[in-house]
Amino acid sequence: MKDCLFCNMQRDTLYEDDCCFAIYDAYPVNPGHALIIPKRHIKTYFEANEQEVRSFHRALHAVKALLDKRYNPDGYNIGINVDEAAGQSVFHLHIHLIPRYNGDMKNPRGGVRGVIPEKRGY
């Protein structure tokens, strides 16, 4: 795709295999925020084939190990935005691996439920 950010980027990879690569996010939420990106141009996770899904799984573990050594986070969030209603703004699948640190927000309870802030507490 000639106008796709991820298809056409010059990349300094953290990880790469036949199906995907990992980079640091250009607008990180926290230090070490990384993206796992398929090489094939697909819009959402639900378009990925089994080989790609296995590749994403391996990449997540490999990048987590690297981030553990470099940043020593206290936890992680893994997130995928699927379609505009869910916040997707780059329409090439990418998986966020976000290191979390004690004290990076006042009350992290609810984790990914915070995508709708008033639903965070339960």
Image (tube, rainbow, N blue to C red):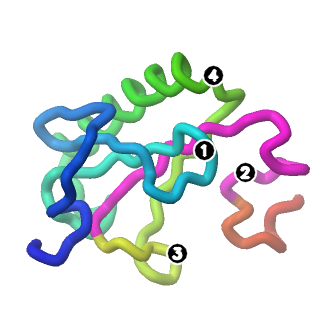
Name the amino acid, label 2. Answer: Gly
Which callout, 2 or 4, points at the residue further toward the start of the chain? Answer: 4
At a point 41% along the width and 29% down the height, the residue shown is: 63
Per the model, the C-alpha gap separating discs 1 and 4 is 14 Å
Name the amino acid, label 1. Answer: Asn
From the image, tell me which residue sits under label 4.
72
Which callout, 1 or 4, points at the residue further toward the start of the chain? Answer: 4
Q: Position of residue 50 (x, y in %)?
A: 20, 44
From the image, tell me which residue sits under label 3.
86
Q: Are marks 2 and 1 in contact (CB under 8 Å)?
A: yes
Which callout, 4 or 3, points at the residue further toward the start of the chain? Answer: 4
Q: Residues within 10 Å of mark 4 (few under 14, many from 20)?
A: some
From the image, tell me which residue sits under label 1.
77
Q: Position of residue 43 (x, y in %)?
A: 27, 69
Q: Position of residue 117 (x, y in %)?
A: 78, 70
From the image, tell me which residue sits under label 2.
111
Q: Are marks 2 and 4 in contact (CB under 8 Å)?
A: no
Residue 72 against residue 90 in the figure, above or below = above
Name the amino acid, label 4. Answer: Asn
* 86 inside magenta stretch: no
Which callout, 3 or 2, points at the residue further toward the start of the chain? Answer: 3
Q: Is residue 66 left or right of residue 15?
A: right
The quadrant of the rendering that contains the C terminus is: bottom right
Per the model, the C-alpha gap separating discs 4 and 3 is 29 Å
Per the model, the C-alpha gap separating discs 2 and 4 is 19 Å
Between 49 and 43, the one lying in front of the other is: 43
Residue 86 against residue 73 in the figure, above or below = below
